[in-house]
Amino acid sequence: MPDPVPFRVAVVDDDSAIRRLVRLFLKRAGYDVVECTTGQEARETLTKVAWDLAILDRRLPDMDGVVLCQELKANPDYRSRYIIMLTGEDEQEDKIEGLELGADDYITKPFQSPELLARVRAGKRIVDLQKELMETNRRLELLSITDGLTKLHNHRYFQDELVRAFEESERYDRPLSLAMIDIDYFKKVNDTYGHAVGDEILKGVANLYRESVRATDLVARYGGEEFAVMMPETNLEDALTFAEKIRALVEETPMQTQAGPLKITVSLGVASIPHSKIHTPKEVIVAADKALYRAKRNGRNQVQAEKRRDVNRTTQAAATGS
């Protein structure tokens, strides 16, 4: 099965005959080719186009190819790329210097096409393995920060991001709000319909939260039936408006389950900084949790704010019997 994106080889050489010959060999073998004639041109071009392997002439008109090789390898974005040095000199010292400064392989002029293609194929195998490893690591990292059931961010990722956002908020004197959300009477749902239906409820509300937040917000499953929404650059009043929107949306949206459509409600607690009594990320969570439990004690299906002298707001829906 062909690669969805062609394997691209960058050829950097000031000799047009060499470039033409290398291009001919590579294109016949199915590779995509980009050409540069100087080190400076390569510096500019290789930052703008995708490439996987570079064949660099050791003696470029404006610099030593080894210098360019060292620069490319020093760039974190290029460390997984493969570099073959091309030179007309067959001296051991040149090869050793090039390899020590980052080159992955060496070809000496004049070269034969079978050798060139064999070395490019070897480089491609290594690059493909590195890409596969990076993709595997990316997937593992994503799994490590994702809740398996709801596909939202998990508790660990939320805690890490809250610490980062809290420090940033304090540093730049920007508001930061947090909403804690709990599904009302969720234990009763599990006891009545079973845990499979309970899982469907969790996934349904998670989808509503995901579709409702802004790109800058972070929504996570905090644990059990409790969720958290972190809202950077959002003051308390705006966070309360958002929380009421979520409360109303859940109330008016039946959850589709194997037991049929089920209506549920949620309770929300909201806290925000700056706040005279909140000095750590943990205290933001505690303040939002206290507001959440006050909402539950007061009858559920409502939004409560942290207690502060200048704000005392409660948003409560009409009694629903939930």
Image (cartoon, rainbow, N blue to C red):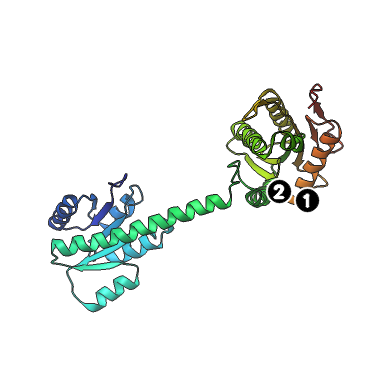
As rendered, which of 45 and 140 lies closer to the eye?
Answer: 140
Direction from residue 93 to residue 182 in the image, left or right: right
Q: In the rendered structure, which amino acid carries the disc numbered 1?
A: His
Q: From the image, tell me which residue sits under label 1.
A: 279
As rendered, which of 306 and 59 lies closer to the eye?
Answer: 306
Direction from residue 114 to residue 52 in the image, left or right: right
Q: Residues within 10 Å of mark 1 (few under 14, many from 20)?
A: few
Residue 250 horizontal/vertical position (percent): 68, 28
As rendered, which of 258 and 66 lies closer to the eye?
Answer: 258
Q: Residue at x 69, y 30 (%)?
A: 246
Q: Residues within 10 Å of mark 2 (few under 14, many from 20)?
A: some
Q: Quadrant of residue 175?
A: top right
Direction from residue 221 to residue 15 in the image, left or right: left
Q: Element at badge 1?
A: loop
Q: From the image, tell me which residue sits under label 2.
A: 170
- Marks 1, 2: nearer the viewer: 1
